[in-house]
Image (spheres, rainbow, N blue to C red):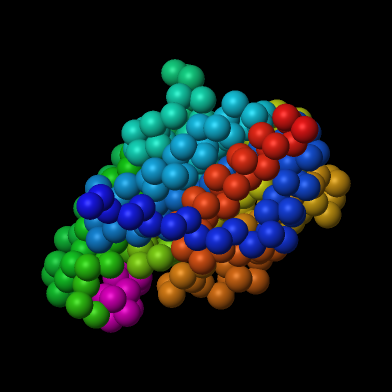
Amino acid sequence: MGEVAPSRPEVDAETLRRCLATLHHAPGGIVTDIDGTISAIAPTPSEARVDDTARRALQRLASRLAVVGVVSGRAAVDGEAMVGLPAVIYIGNHGMERRHLGTRWAHPGAVASQASITAALAEIAAEAVRRGADDGMIVENKGLSGTVHYRLAADPEGVRAALLPIAVAAAQAHGLVVTEGRLIVEVRPSIVVNKGTALVDLAAEYRLQGMIFLGDDLTDVDGFVALRTLREHDALATLRVGVLGAETHPRVREEIDVSVQGVAACAALLEAIADGLDAARSG
């Protein structure tokens, strides 16, 4: 007797209606975060996998919309390897780089900071070991930025309390800035680039009239704020979809229009949007 396939999470009709109404404003686009949005949070970055339903939906959407993109804190090449769809625009390092159809762009200020990123990460790792704040720590050099993960720590809050001042001191010494996300501390170049500026650039470049952004973490709030600004000041139809879970930061809830519960529900929504666009086209 074969295994019964898991049922797809039910998609809220009003959420779907609002998504389709947003994309009715053509040209339209959908951009999504990766980790925690279309890929379940994994113990280590290398263990994360994109949800198969989400991948199939993005592939369908890429043939129906002007823009389908992913914007992640990961390096763009990493995001591209995870998603694996040629037509998708891959924005990495929180907007500091982009890959699409064989082309690559990187922010000059971020490129100029690579040596500083490497040096700061080395100092953070050494000082964390010296102070005994390295329990479960994973240091990830993403080229244009760096991330220190502490998800595997026995006492994540205790590690964060010790790690954060170490990271701030090292970053300041190298002219960098520190940001935080879900059980991570990040070191970035001191430039005004984030997921929000990346979304604004995409909207302008492709002259979008409708845009949806899906995200789950504190680092996605820049994107949510940008879409609110585009709606209020540029009359762009936008919708901000929060993918919620036990670790959701309050700021995420404050800046979203609609929500789904977890990665599977997000994937189901993307699939339903693709179905809805197909139905509208055939009708």
Q: Which residues are magenta?
A: 156-166
**Residue lying farthest to the front in this orientation:** 1
Is 112 contained in the magenta span?
no
Q: Position of residue 76 (x, y in %)?
A: 41, 36
Q: Residue at x 47, y 45 (%)?
A: 54
Q: Is residue 34 above or below residue 246?
A: above
Asked whether the viewer can see residue 173, the reply is: no
Q: Magenta-highlighted stretch: main secondary structure? A: helix
Which of the pair 3/76 is nearer the observer?
A: 3
Image position of 270 (left or right of 28): left
Asked whether the viewer can see residue 213, the reply is: yes
Which of the pair 51/76 is nearer the observer?
A: 51
Q: Position of residue 115 (x, y in %)?
A: 31, 40
Image position of 273 (left or right of 73): right
Q: Quadrant of residue 27?
A: top right
Is 160 contained in the magenta span?
yes
Disc tally is 0
Q: Is residue 176 above or below residue 111?
A: below
Q: Residue at x 21, y 64 (%)?
A: 137
**Residue lying farthest to the top in this orientation:** 102
The quarter of the rendered structure image containing the C terminus is: top right
Image position of 104 (left or right of 270): left
Q: Residue at x 29, y 70 (%)?
A: 163
Which of the pair 115/162 is nearer the observer?
A: 162
Q: Is residue 104 above or below residue 37?
A: above
Which of the pair 113/143 is nearer the observer?
A: 143
Q: Position of residue 150 (x, y in %)?
A: 27, 66
Q: Quadrant of residue 6?
A: bottom left
Q: Residue at x 70, y 50 (%)?
A: 19
Q: Position of residue 92 (x, y in %)?
A: 45, 40
